Amino acid sequence: MKGRIRALALAGLSATALAASWGSAQAGAFGVREQSAEAQGLAFAGAGSGSGGVSSMFWNPAVITMAPGFVKEQNLSLIALSGGIRTLPGTNPAFAPLGDSGELGQTAVVPAGATSYQLTDRIWLGLSTGAPFGLTTKARNVWAGELYGRSNRIFSLAFNPVIGFKVNEWFSIAAGPNIQYFRLTLRQAVPLPIPPFSPANLPSSFLKGDSWGVGFTAGALFTAPTGTTLGVGYRSSIHHDIEGSIGVPLLALAPVAGQVTAKFNTPEKVTVGLTQEINPVTRINLGFEWDNWSRAGTIGIVSRARGIPVSFLPLNYKDGYTYSIGAEYDWSPNLTLRAGVNYEQSPIDFENRSVRLPDADRINVSVGASYQWNEKLTLHFAYSHLFVDRAPILSGPGRDYNTANVVFAGVSNGSADLVSVGFRYVLGEPARPVAPAPLVRKN
C-alpha cells in the first residue's frame, strides 16, 4: 500500500509546472511586461526605440542616451485578472462532479523603476528594477482539475545596471549585467487511492524554491534627421539553479519529501522598436518582440540527498511573438495623448497547455496620456484591456501532463484590465554637451 501511495504521489508531483496559473497579465507564459506606464499607453509599440522614456531600458538599454542630465522614473501597475476553467465531458467521472476552477484571477500590483545619469557628453549610467516574471493565482481548493493544480505563486525581481555610450549623433550602444531573483511555490492535490480516499478531501503536495542568477542586457539605437528612431535590444537568458523542497502529506510518504534542486533557464528576449515622427506633434510607433520560451523544455526535479530525479516539469513551451502599433499626439505643450494595440502569439498551445498555465493568444488595446506638470515633473497614465482567446485543455494518458492516468478536459477563458501610473523627474540641470572644435582651414 505504501509503495502504491508513493508512486501516485510522484505521478502527481510530475504535473507541477514552473509557472503561474492562467498566464501573466501582459506577456506570454509567465512573463510580465508592465515596466513603463508611458509605453503601456502605446501597447508597448516602440518600446525598443524609446517610447517608454528611460523605462524603455528594460527592452533596450541604449535608450538612456536619449535622456540628458539626471532622470528618475517610477511606475506602478494594477493588474486585475479575470478568468477560469470550465470542466468538460470526458473528465474522469470521480472528479467531474467537483466542478469548475472558480475565479483564478488575483489582483496584483507591479512596481518598476528606471534611472539614468549623464556622466559626460558621450557616457550615461543607468539602473532599472522590476519584475520580469511572476503572478499569483488560486483555483477553488476542491475542483475537477485539482490533481493538476490548486495554487501557484511566482515572484521575481531584477536589477539591471547599464552603461551607455553615444558613438556619434546618430548611433548609441549600451550594455550591463542583469541580476535576477526567482521564487516559486506550487500546490496541487495528491492522487491518493480512491477508495478509501475521496476526491473531495485530498491533501495538497507542494513544490517551492528560489534562486539568484545573472545574465546581461545590450542594445543599440539609431537616429536619423528624418525623424526616424530605430532601436534593437537584447535580454539574455538567465540560468537558475533553484534550490528548495518538495513535500507530500502523511508519514508514509516521508521518503518522497525533502530538499530538491531544479535547473531552469529564462527565455532570451529580442525587441525591435521603430518611432517615426510624422509632424512636430505626431509620432507613429511600431514594435516586435521575440521571446525564446522554447528553451523551457522538460525540467527535472532532483533529490539533493539521492541525486536522482523525483519528478519532472514538462513545460515544453514554444517561442512567443508580439507585434504592436501605436500613435502619439501632442495635444498641447504640456499634454500628450497616445493609443496602441498589440497581438501576441503565446508560447503555449493545446499541445503544452495545463490547468496551471492555460495561456493563449491575446490582443491588447491601450490608451494613455502624459502631462508635464512643470519643467522637472511629468506624470503618466495608461489603461489596457486584454482579450485572451478561449483555450482547450486536456490532461491525462498520452499527454505531457498526466497524473495517475486521471483525465481532465476543460476550456479556459480570461481577460485582464490594467491601470498604470508613473512619473518622470529631472534632478538638477542637464549636462552640457562639449562644443565641437572649430574647423581650421588653410588659406
Image: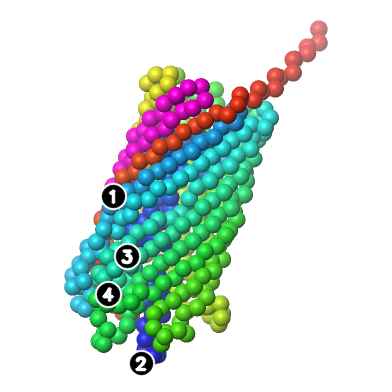
Report the Cα–Cα distance between label 1 and label 3.
Answer: 16 Å
Tell me the residue at 46%/54% (across/down): 133
Residue under label 3: 355
292 is higher (above) or lower (below) than 186 = above
Three-letter amino acid code of the residue under disc 2: Met
Q: Which residue is mark 4?
A: 407
Q: Secondary structure at mark 3?
A: loop
Q: Earlier in the sequence, mark 2 or mark 1?
A: 2
Mark 2 near mark 4, Cβ–Cβ under 8 Å? no
Give the left or right position of residue 167, taking residue 426 as reference: right
Q: Residue 381 falls in which quadrant of the image?
A: top left
Q: Against 6, is 59 above or below?
A: above
* Mark-to-mark CA distance, 2 and 4: 23 Å
Residue pictured at 33% horizontal, 74% vertical: 189
Residue bearing mark 1: 415
Q: Secondary structure at mark 4?
A: loop
Q: Residues within 10 Å of mark 2 (few under 14, many from 20)?
A: few
Asked whether the residues under the numbered discs 2 and 1 touch, taking CB atoms below 8 Å apart as contact, a structural biologist would say no
Badge 1 marks a residue whose secondary structure is strand
Which residue extends farthest right?
442
Q: Is residue 55 visible?
A: yes
Which tag, 2 or 4, sits closer to the chain's start?
A: 2
- Residue type beneath disc 1: Ser
Over which residues does the magenta segment extend?
361-390
Query: Which colour scheme appears in the figure?
Result: rainbow
Q: CA distance from mark 2 to mark 1?
A: 45 Å
Q: Amino acid at mark 4?
A: Val
Q: Which residue is mark 2?
A: 1
Residue 285 image-quadrant placement: top left
Left or right: 162 with respect to 186? right
Question: Disc 3 to disc 2, how far (Cα)?
Answer: 29 Å
Residue type at numbered disc 3: Val
